[in-house]
Image (cartoon, rainbow, N blue to C red):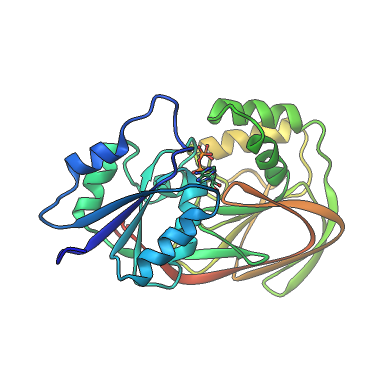
Amino acid sequence: MTKHPHIRFIINPTSGPKSRVDVAARIKLHLDHDKYGHDIVYTDYAGHATELAKQAAEGGCAVVVAVGGDGTVNEVARGLLRTETALGIIPRGSGNGLARHLQVPLSVDGAIRFINQGHRSKIDSGNINGHPFFTTAGIGFDAYISSVFAGSKRRGLKTYVELILKEVRNYRHLPIKATINGKTIDTDMFVMAFANAAQYGNNAYIAPMANIRDGLLDVCLVRQLDMLKALNLSYSMLAKKPAGADSAEYFKAEKVEVITDHHIMYHADGEFIGKASEFIVGMLPQSLHVVAPCV
Ligand SMILES: Nc1ncnc2c1ncn2[C@@H]1O[C@H](COP(=O)(O)OP(=O)(O)OP(=O)(O)O)[C@@H](O)[C@H]1O
């Protein structure tokens, strides 16, 4: 390592658009080498980014930059939780929820210049059944969509919207018992989303009022969804407004527990995890340093 603060760039070679920018060349061109030393490493398999990030944090690296989509950002951030090493992002996914929330420029050159500015702040992270998340987690329909999306070669907002409109007709709400802020309710649930950041990605705001630094989950509960409510909710999400009370209900909570007789799908940061019938969702306030101003 040089005498300058060190930055490790972790590139997921499988994420990003087909027309690839040579990110390593752009880093060499635009990084402020008077300010920072750096190394560039590539992931070889799913989960590798967490190991590479942990290793960098243990070596005293100042910043680890995730070059990829929210899946890569999640893996890198997991490796940096509760360390002094900050997460940076060069967004290369289709949704880029955390980058958008932190106002990181979406172009490669812009994101590198943003890193050069050297802003640092702390954000919260969430946890669903032991899986950390930084943008959103969810149980029910959004997890089902993430499982279908994972098997699709196509990416982007258009694919998501088409999938949602196709699948919303087939997916059924289920009865659950949810404990939110110590109060237990019996309810139907089509989807329950837990937001740390305000959006899923693609500027689709599931919890427009979410604050990533308030130590609280923003919970969005959709009890039942028909086509009309789905259109209403989609419009609200894209307009960055809360949906009407007949479509969705919103809560702020430190902890949520859900129990059901059914096995329900769940996701963390858009990565489908599996199915469970009991969920514990909580927060780790101020647990991750990020390269972004506290706005
Ligand atoms: N070398 C690799 N080979 C195969 N999979 C990898 C490799 N490196 C990382 N991954 C996996 O790729 C997954 C998807 O990554 P990521 O979300 O960053 O990209 P993306 O799917 O293109 O983005 P988006 O989800 O926004 O469309 C991650 O969950 C990660 O585990």
Can the viewer see residue 146? yes
Residue lying farthest to the front in this orientation: 44
Residue in the image at 14% along x and 67% along y: 3
Q: In the figure, residue 107 lies in which quadrant?
A: top left
Can the viewer see residue 294? no
| Quadrant containing the N terminus in the rendered view | bottom left
Q: Considering depth in this image, is 210 or 285 the residue closer to the camera?
A: 285
Residue lying farthest to the bottom in this orientation: 182
Q: In the figure, residue 36 lies in which quadrant?
A: bottom left
Residue in the image at 57% along x and 38% along y: 236
- Above or below for 256 versus 163: below
Q: In the figure, residue 149 lies in which quadrant?
A: top right
Residue in the image at 42% along x and 59% along y: 52
Residue 162 x %, y %: 65, 25
Residue 187 lies left or right of residue 293; in this view the side is right
Residue 183 x %, y %: 74, 72
Residue 108 x %, y %: 30, 38
Residue 47 lies left or right of residue 7; in this view the side is right
| Quadrant containing the C terminus in the rendered view | bottom left
Q: Considering depth in this image, is 239 or 57 the residue closer to the camera?
A: 57
Residue 177 x %, y %: 82, 63
- Above or below for 148 versus 134: above
